[in-house]
Image: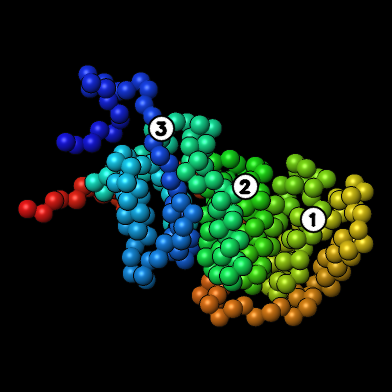
């Protein structure tokens, strides 16, 4: 019996009230690393990300015996897709307005499947074991989905972004760390200036490790503006913060792009990641329906 795109009642009319679908999420990083519901998938080096995501979500659907919805953020192609996956493995992409329930109700349904704090604990555990690539990808997935659901200024979105910035710093990805930390600082400066100082300090710590003169100048000017605004508001209470502000001003005045102190060499496993373009942290918009790579027909049973 073919699946209907819309739940129907016994008279074959659209159902007025149906239980919400279980909602999962997936994420594909720029390097192809793939996350489904807070778990990094083992891809084996040859498996396409879309097939791995569909197989993983279909497993949930088979376990539940019901269709499962999933939101996929694919940074490798800069797209967002919403899927409906059935127990037989078939799938289709749906428009945002079809993915009921809407708004806050959908956000709660998505986060109930795997609470954000549980994901943070998983990220921290990876970081403690020095599994920094896994921690970084999981943090990126969490930040992207929270930003999509709640907005960039939401408290959980800011915390996820700050965690990702810190892990990027540990990895030696200082430009990515600077950009992410600057985003947090920028938002704090516009929404809650009293809480902005530590965020500006974290962004400055990452910026001090940059070597590219263009990035030093561009990011440094924004940092200096933030420090001056905080100083004008009488919010710099610690000498270390005054010292950071002076260091930014001095480095910009010298016009020198080298780091203030030698930066430790990144771990060998990070060499391939150094070419990744640093994100400007803009959430992606949902794409149109019918993305072929996420549309799959039912598997045929063997005769």
Task: Give the crowd class for mark 3: few <14, some 14-19, many >=20 residues within 10 Å.
Answer: some
Alpha-carbon span between mark 1 and mark 2? 17 Å
In the image, which is nearer the foreground, mark 2 or mark 3? 3
- Which residue position holds label 2? 157
Q: Earlier in the sequence, mark 3 or mark 1?
A: 3
Q: Look at the numbered discs 2 and 3 and tell me whether their residues touch, using CB distance below 8 Å.
A: no
Depth order, front residue of 268/303: 303
Q: Secondary structure at mark 1?
A: helix
Which image quadrant is residue 268 in?
Answer: bottom right
**Among the two numbered marks 2 and 3 on one chain, the one whose residue lies closer to the N terminus:** 3
Number of numbered discs visible in the structure rendering: 3
Q: Report which quarter residue 32 is drawn in.
A: bottom left
Q: Is residue 54 above or below residue 18?
A: below
Q: Is residue 243 above or below residue 298?
A: below
Location of the N terminus by quadrant is top left
Residue position marked by numbered label 3 in the rendering: 20
**Hey, which residue is sitting farthest left in the picture?**
303
User: What is the image's colouring?
Assistant: rainbow
How far apart, in angstroms, are the residues tagged by discs 2 and 3?
24 Å
């Amino acid at each position: 019996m073919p699946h209907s795109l819309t739940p129907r009642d016994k008279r074959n009319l659209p159902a007025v009230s149906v239980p919400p679908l279980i909602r999962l999420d997936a994420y594909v990083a720029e390097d192809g690393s793939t996350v489904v519901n807070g778990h990094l998938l083992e891809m084996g080096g040859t498996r396409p990300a879309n097939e791995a995501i569909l197989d993983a979500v279909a497993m949930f659907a088979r376990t539940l015996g019901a269709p499962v919805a999933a939101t996929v953020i694919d940074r490798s192609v800069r797209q967002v897709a919403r899927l409906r996956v059935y127990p037989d493995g078939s799938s289709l992409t749906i428009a945002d307005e079809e993915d009921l329930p809407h708004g806050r109700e959908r956000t709660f349904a998505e986060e109930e499947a795997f609470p954000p704090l549980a994901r943070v604990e998983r990220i921290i555990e990876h970081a403690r074991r020095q599994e920094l690539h896994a921690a970084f990808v999981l943090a990126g997935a969490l930040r992207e989905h929270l930003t999509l659901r709640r907005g960039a200024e939401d408290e959980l979105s800011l915390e996820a972004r700050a965690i990702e910035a810190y892990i990027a710093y540990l990895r030696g990805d200082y430009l990515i760390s600077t950009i992410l930390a600057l985003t947090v600082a920028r938002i704090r400066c516009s929404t809650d200036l009293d809480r902005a100082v530590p965020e500006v300090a974290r962004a400055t710590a990452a910026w001090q490790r940059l070597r590219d003169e263009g990035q030093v100048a561009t990011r440094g000017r924004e940092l200096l503006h933030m420090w001056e605004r905080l100083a004008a508001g009488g919010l710099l209470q610690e000498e270390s913060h005054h010292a950071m502000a002076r260091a930014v001003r001095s480095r910009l005045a010298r016009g020198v792009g080298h780091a203030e102190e030698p930066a430790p060499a990144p771990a060998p496993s990070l060499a391939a990641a150094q070419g990744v373009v640093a994100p400007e942290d803009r959430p992606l918009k949902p794409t149109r329906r019918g993305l072929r790579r996420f549309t799959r027909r039912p598997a045929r049973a063997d005769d």
